[in-house]
Amino acid sequence: MGANFDLNALSGINAASSGLAVISNNLANSQSVGFKSSRTEFADIFSGSQNSAGSGVRVEGITQDFTQGSISGTGRELDMALDGEGFFILADQTGKYDNIYSRNGSFKLDQDGLLTDQTGNQVQGYALNATKSTDSTPVFGTTLGSIDLDALNKTPNSTSEMTFDINVDGQEAYNLSSDNASVATGTVGTPGHLGALLDPANASPPYEGFPDFSTNKIVHDSLGGEHRMTTDFYKRGVVDGGATAPLPASASDFDGDGTTDKYTSWMVQTTVQDYDEVSGTWSPSGVDANDIIGTNNSAVLRELRFDDKGVLQQVREPNSTDPAAVAGAAVDADLDWTDTGTTAPGMKWLINNPITGGADPISMTSDYEQMTEYSGSYDIRGVTQNGYAIGDLVGLATGKDGTIEARYSNGRSVAVAQLVIANFTDNNAMEKLGGQAYAQSYDSGPAQLGTPETNGMGSIVEGSLEYSNVDTTAELVNMIQIQRTYQASAQVISTSQTLTQTILNL
């Protein structure tokens, strides 16, 4: 019987020793970033009949607690905390595993511009799909890969699209000339209208006023050179609807009911200028490469037509295929103009500047789709262009959804990648690798991938780290309890020895 006491007590000492080791490890890692505490699971040992005293205790398992740790701000832009479910995905640099997983979001950029953890494992995510993306609407791929921030913005990008999101004042008075009789006929313009804008010196009568509204934006050529593109808006007048078939080519039948619709006509003039550092002034540098008039125009002209609800319905531009236009005749008839929908494609500028003259022409589309004509005021909601000069990475920002935005020395700020996080059916079955890292195992199930804030995944907290979830006070209390178990088991052995000695002394 004494032997059974000793073995039972010894199992208690061994189990208590394992419990103390787990508590010791928890306390030692109470400040480790992303560390998850563990607890020892004990189970009794029974064999034989139900009235058996039992054979002691064993350690059935060591279970980790994956509840959220405290999130603390660090102010460092490459520190990221996961608030909620999931693990950061890292490519294993040892090659033993495809990917490893961690809650430790202390990241850095290596010498090649790759986002890595502090040991060099590359953070995984989705790269930007440059073909489908715009500066305002990023589109990311769906293939997991390393996040490379160094390859971006190393070469300039020529402006190919400019988007105008502007409200022009519907209460503005007519501007282009004192005689708006041609407006009522629905024609695009007479020499007194178009000629004044395209060739003021030869216009009859010349236009000497100012635009109703003007905005400018820096655009870029193929060498990354900067040029100021100025867009002037002139309110031309209102054309009444109601005409019926047969309709002329210029008809403003927006709804296709066979009757012309009422619209307001605005003329848009675009010029390109360069800054002269000697004189301190801006001077025209861009020449209209399409130049259908044949006079080396420094301006490009468009007409915008807004319906009676203030919605843009048509953008019209001079038609270079019209025989009269090609011959150099005045572009003042409807047949010389083409409806392009709500965009103006094919705008092309020859850069007539000795410094940047080696650049390719700037070929761009002007997108006016978001423009409106509501009364009250002029409102620039946004004017954007997609060109840029070369620049160096100067900063990063990460959104709650894991979108990483890069800031460059050329003033460009663009989304470049999106973090991907993983989760598992049984987190406790993952293989522990140390360093707050884990690997997928058969029992854990395959990695379930998703972007932050989707499908139950947690969100990213930038400039913060998730610290250990160890409850120091609770661990100290558990240590005292297990210490007593250890002492009690040792006392059982001591008592058993005393009893055995008593029997031997009989």
Image (cartoon, rainbow, N blue to C red):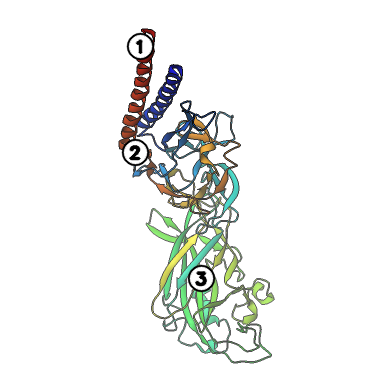
- The residue that disc 1 covers is 502
Tell me, yes or no, if residue 315 can be seen here: yes
Q: How far apart are marks 2 and 3 (CA)?
A: 55 Å
Q: Quadrant of the C terminus?
A: top left
The quadrant where residue 217 appears: bottom left
Residue tagged by mark 3? 370
Do the residues under discs 2 and 1 have CB atoms within 8 angstroms? no
Residue 49 position (above or below residue 86) = above
x, y percent for residue 369: 54, 71
Give coordinates of residue 135: x percent, y percent.
51, 57
Occupied quadrant, residue 318: bottom right
Q: Check residue 471 in the rendering and tell me which mark sits there, or answer none.
A: 2
Q: Which of 214 and 283 is in front in this view?
A: 214
Tell me what residue is drawn at x 36 percent, y 15 percent: 499
Mark 3: few, some, or many residues within 10 Å (few <14, many ≥20)?
some
Residue occupying the far top of the picture: 505
Q: What element carries label 1?
A: helix
